[in-house]
Image (tube, rainbow, N blue to C red):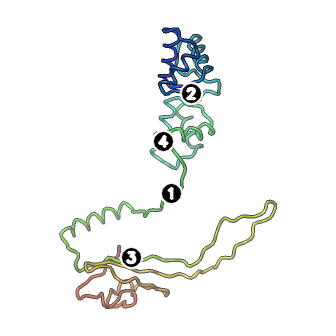
Amino acid sequence: MVLTAYCKQRTIQLYLERRVSYGNVSQVLATEGFCISKKTVWTTIQKYEEHETISHLPGSGRPFKLTREMLDVIEEQMGQDDENTATQLVRILEERGYKVSKTTIVRARPILGWTFHGSHYCHLIRSVNKEKGLQWAVKNRDNNFEAVRWMDESMIQLENHRTFSYRNIGTAPKPKPRAKHPYKVMVWAGISHKGAMNICLLNASVNSAVLSGGAAHAPVAFPSKETTKGQTPTRQ
């Protein structure tokens, strides 16, 4: 049973200063809301008389090999690159004069609060495109975008191929059939100052003429009822 610092101090005070017996110490602590057995009282007093402290004593297990400086290095490297492996961290620590095993690194990362999970997908924006996007935003900051359509597309592949499956021990995994050219559908949608456009499905090839022809030349992708004279479709 792990006692709080108050319970330990109270036990020592009752026994050494007030000369209360082990059993009576347990009863007094019970009236204060602490359920402590007579044996626990005796053990606490014996440890105090032997070591003259109520603090936790060092355990008999294997001591932790990483120092505070080594943990700071691991925290720094994980903050710079969250894909660092244990092998890479071992090499970085060795370059700084620290000798540590890969197993110790694996145990240290959870202590520092790092856990391993799958990453979320996000778009990759190149630096040159960031600059162009900023220039476009500054140029159009006074535009109310009433004559602009914002459109985007997504290609949906109608095929599922599981890469993981169960098999009996000692047997070879069964091959999974997979289409060389699976059926695909392109989904188009957009918004404008008037509101959301209809969702359009395309199962045919989309060439440059459809992409550059605008709303008036692509009635399938862009419904004619949304067409307004002077509108310029814009893709983002």
Left or right of residue 236: residue 34: right
SS under mark 1: loop
Q: Quadrant of residue 188?
A: bottom left
Q: Which mark is residue 119?
A: 1
Q: Is residue 124 above or below residue 203?
A: above
| Position of residue 229 measured from the top left corner of the image (x, y, whole percent) | 23, 88
Distance between the alpha carbons at the discs numbered 2 and 1 = 40 Å
Left or right of residue 176: residue 150: left
Q: What residue does disc 3 label?
A: 152
Q: What residue does disc 2 label?
A: 2
* Front residue (pair 27, 208): 27
What residue is shown at x 78% (from left), y 63% (from top)? Answer: 168
Q: Earlier in the sequence, mark 4 or mark 2?
A: 2
Q: Which mark is residue 210?
A: none
Distance between the alpha carbons at the discs numbered 4 and 3 = 38 Å
User: Could you classify mark 2 by the number of other residues whose Cα lies within 10 Å: few (under 14), some (14-19), or many (20 or more)?
Assistant: few
Instruction: Indicate which label's residue lies in the foreground, 4 or 3.
Output: 3
User: Could you classify mark 3 by the number of other residues whose Cα lies within 10 Å: few (under 14), some (14-19), or many (20 or more)?
Assistant: few
Q: Earlier in the sequence, mark 3 or mark 1?
A: 1
Kind of residue at badge 1: Ser
Kind of residue at badge 2: Val
| Position of residue 101 measured from the top left corner of the image (x, y, whole percent) | 63, 36
User: Could you classify mark 4 by the number of other residues whose Cα lies within 10 Å: few (under 14), some (14-19), or many (20 or more)?
Assistant: some
| Position of residue 34 measured from the top left corner of the image (x, y, whole percent) | 51, 26
Instruction: Indicate which label's residue lies in the foreground, 4 or 2.
Output: 2
